Image (spheres, rainbow, N blue to C red):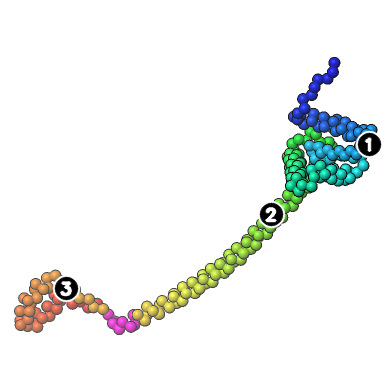
């Protein structure tokens, strides 16, 4: 019984895809070599894996094969500048698509994905790249932290200096306040003595008048003619007091 037909489509399992790629790549390179020897043909074969690795075979020189290919394509499409420009842009677009595909594969590998198709050397190379990246990130982080610490220390020293200046000012103001207080205490008795002497009155008088004085005033004025004894009695009733 013969083998069944294989559906030509992308293999979803990455391990199976890598195994199939390795087998068919070797078969393709073998066929290209046999074709160049048996048919005396100039063969150039270039293969890029999904991980971006290059596999090639050329019967003479790959550069001469590529140059010959370019000249043949130009002769095939003539000297039409428009066609040549279109071809140029098509090649550029194909190259950019391939680069984008390689970058996507590398990004997946750096994120820890699609690693089943890599060998020991590829994994070691990937590990070295990751370690170098981590080292660069740590160096940058340490540099930023050191700069921030130095800036904070500078601000702290300025604040400390300002606190010292404020403390000195407060101490000076406190001393001035105490001196003024002592001067006031020393000058207060003199002021009191000066106030007492400048008044010039050894004693003070107060006049107290009863509420009944105005009512009895006319009667007593009418009785003043009665003699000096009544005048002497009127003086206490008017409320004159000596202190």
Quarter of the image for residue 8 reads: top right
Start and end of the magenta stretch? 196-203
Q: CA distance from mark 3 to mark 2?
A: 93 Å
Rendering coords of residue 157 (x, y %): 64, 63
Report the quarter where the N terminus lies.
top right
Between 145 and 187, the one lying in front of the other is 145
What numbered label is drawn on residue 95?
Answer: none
Residue name at image x 23 percent, y 78 percent: 205
Q: Residue most toward the top?
A: 1
Which residue is the site of mark 1?
Answer: 40
Q: Closer to the N terminus: mark 2 or mark 1?
A: 1
Q: Quadrant of the C terminus?
A: bottom left
| Dots 2, 1 in contact, CB < 8 A | no
Report if the CB atoms under discs 1 and 3 are less than 8 Å apart: no
Q: Nearer the viewer, residue 166 or 148?
A: 148
Q: Earlier in the sequence, mark 3 or mark 2?
A: 2
- Asked if residue 13 can be seen in this view, the reply is no
Residue pointed to by mark 2: 145
User: How busy is the neighbourhood of tag 3: few (under 14 within 10 Å), some, or many (20 plus)?
Assistant: some
Query: What residue would you read off at disc 3?
Result: 209
| Element type at mark 1 | loop
In the picture provided, is 122 more to the left or to the right than 188?
right
């Amino acid at each position: 019984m013969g083998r069944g037909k294989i559906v030509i489509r992308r293999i979803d399992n990455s391990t199976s895809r890598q195994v199939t790629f390795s087998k068919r790549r070797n078969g393709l390179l073998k066929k290209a070599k046999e074709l160049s020897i048996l048919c005396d043909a100039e063969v150039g074969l270039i293969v890029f894996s999904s991980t971006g690795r290059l596999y090639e075979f050329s019967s003479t020189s790959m550069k001469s094969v590529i140059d010959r290919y370019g000249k043949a394509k130009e002769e095939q499409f003539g000297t039409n500048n428009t066609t040549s420009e279109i071809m140029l842009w098509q090649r550029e677009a194909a190259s950019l698509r391939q680069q984008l595909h390689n970058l996507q594969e590398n990004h997946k590998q750096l994120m820890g994905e699609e690693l089943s198709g890599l060998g020991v050397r590829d994994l070691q190379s990937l590990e070295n790249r990751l370690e170098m990246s981590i080292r660069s990130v740590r160096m940058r982080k340490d540099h930023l932290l050191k700069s921030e610490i130095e800036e904070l220390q500078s601000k702290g020293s300025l604040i400390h200096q300002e606190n010292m200046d404020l403390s000195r000012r407060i101490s000076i103001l406190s001393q001035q306040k105490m001196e003024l207080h002592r001067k006031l205490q020393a000058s207060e008795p003199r002021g009191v003595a000066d106030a007492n002497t400048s008044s010039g009155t050894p004693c003070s008088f107060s006049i107290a008048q009863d509420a009944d004085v105005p009512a009895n005033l006319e009667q007593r004025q009418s009785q003043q003619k009665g003699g000096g004894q009544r005048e002497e009695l009127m003086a206490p009733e008017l409320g004159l007091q000596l202190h």
